[in-house]
Amino acid sequence: MAVPKSKITRMKRGFRRSAHALKAETYVEDKESGELRRPHHIDLKSGMYRGRQILEPKDSV
């Protein structure tokens, strides 16, 4: 069983846990449709990615 050689201080523990904080997701406005989408993701409504048609567009119901 792993046993720490010395006590981890509150400061060191805090440094390690500082990366655990949740960050808000980033969205960008699509140039073609003006819809919000995640960066580097396909626009599901139009099916476009980087100016190319990747998927069939979703039907508007």
Image (tube, grey):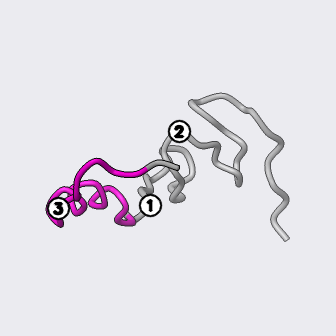
Q: Position of residue 49 (x, y in %)?
A: 62, 35
Labelled disc at residue 40: 2
Name the residue type under label 3.
Thr
13 left or right of 3? left
Name the residue type under label 2.
His
Q: Name the residue furthest bottom.
A: 61
Query: Which comes before the other along the chain, label 3 or label 1?
Result: 3
Q: Position of residue 15 (x, y in %)?
A: 21, 56
Q: Position of residue 18 (x, y in %)?
A: 27, 60
Disc 3/disc 2 C-alpha distance (Å): 40 Å
Disc 2/disc 1 C-alpha distance (Å): 13 Å
**Does residue 17 belong to the magenta stretch?**
yes
**Does residue 26 belong to the magenta stretch?**
no
Name the residue type under label 1.
Glu
Q: In the picture shown, does residue 16 fall above or below 56? A: below
Between disc 3 and disc 1, the foreground one is 3
Label 3 CA crowd tier, 10 Å (few <14, some 14–19, many 20+): few
Q: Which residue is mark 3?
A: 9
Q: Which residue is mark 1?
A: 25
Query: Which comes before the other along the chain, label 2 or label 1?
Result: 1
Secondary structure under badge 1?
loop
58 left or right of 32? right
For the point 81% across and 55% down, which residue is it?
A: 58
Secondary structure under badge 2?
loop
Q: Which image quadrant for residue 7?
A: bottom left
Cβ–Cβ below 8 Å for labels 3 and 1?
no
Secondary structure under badge 3?
loop
Q: Position of residue 47 (x, y in %)?
A: 72, 43
Q: In the picture shown, does residue 26 fall above or below 53? A: below
Q: Which residues are magenta?
A: 3-22
